[in-house]
Image (tube, helix red, strand yellow):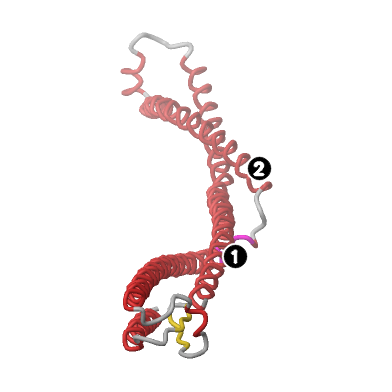
Amino acid sequence: MKQRKELESLVQQRDFLDNFQKKLNDEIVLLYEKLKIQSSALKKALLQTETRNIAKLKAEVFYLQKEYLRETTKVKVLEEELESPMNVHRWRKLAAADPTSFELITKTQTLQKRLIAKTEEVVEKELLLQQTKKLYEEVKEMLRRAPGPEVLMNLRKIKEALRYKTREAKALASELNMYHSQINEYKLEIERLNNEIQDLKKKFYAKIQRLTRKNNANKIIPLDIKKNIGKIKRSGGGFKFDIPQHQDEVEEIYAMADSNVNNNLVAV
């Protein structure tokens, strides 16, 4: 009876730990979801800091456009001057006759090369600016849908709680496995005790049958044992007997049964 109560108590503890572990797993899943949200918000914040360079890029593009217009104006002026050349070898004579004009033409050619390079650079900057604007709009939309900045402040607390809950869940799972092992050991022990009790009963019945056959053969005790009830009453293995003769053998049987039962109870 005591073993059964202990077994029921262990089963109740096991069920309680199972339910607690399920609840803890649900909390862990919820914390993981919150952690994902926080990580996403953190990434969005990092992207937002990167988009702050848009103003700087706009200023650089504006400067390049201004320089482009200035250089374009210079080129137009030089082209107008070069539309009516005096002769085919004008540049050679010009180098000797008018060094200033020749230097200006050389500078114009250099500026044309720079203008081509700057134009290509402006095109690249414009493409980069368009991509940055697109990224900025996407990040802006994501941030509009994301939680507020207070969520970022709780990110560290959530991570710490998640680690604590994970350790607690592992400890509870280990304890639950230990209780399962104890329950299985108790079941095996109860089964072994039941088998030993059955063996004792069989041996006890066999001993009584041998004594009965012996007494019947020697005509020492009557066949009706019920008439002698109350003379010598002993109990063992859950049975009572009234045997006036061969008391030594009966004492041996009871001693053997009581010794086995006591040893089994101590083992449990």
**Dividing the picture into quarters, in which one does residue 91 lie?**
top left
Where is residue 220? Give x, y as percent: 36, 82
Q: Give left or right: position of 96 versus 62.
A: left
State whether residue 102 is above or below residue 198: above
Three-letter amino acid code at disc 2?
Answer: Glu
Q: Is residue 187 above or below residue 1?
A: above
Observer-nearest of 181 and 189:
189
Magenta-highlighted residues: 151-158
Residue at label 1? Answer: 154
Foreground residue, 147 or 130? 147
Compared with 186, 246 (above or below) is below
Q: Which mark is residue 141?
A: 2
Which SS class for mark 1? loop
- Main SS of the magenta part reads helix
Residue neighbourhood size for the residue with mark 1, other residues' Cα within 10 Å, grouped as few (<14), some (14–19), many (≥20)? few
Q: Position of residue 223 (x, y in %)?
A: 44, 75
Q: Where is residue 208 in the image (x, y as percent from the top left)?
A: 37, 75
Q: How far apart are marks 1 and 2 (CA)?
A: 23 Å
Asked if the stretch drawn in magenta spans residue 143, the answer is: no
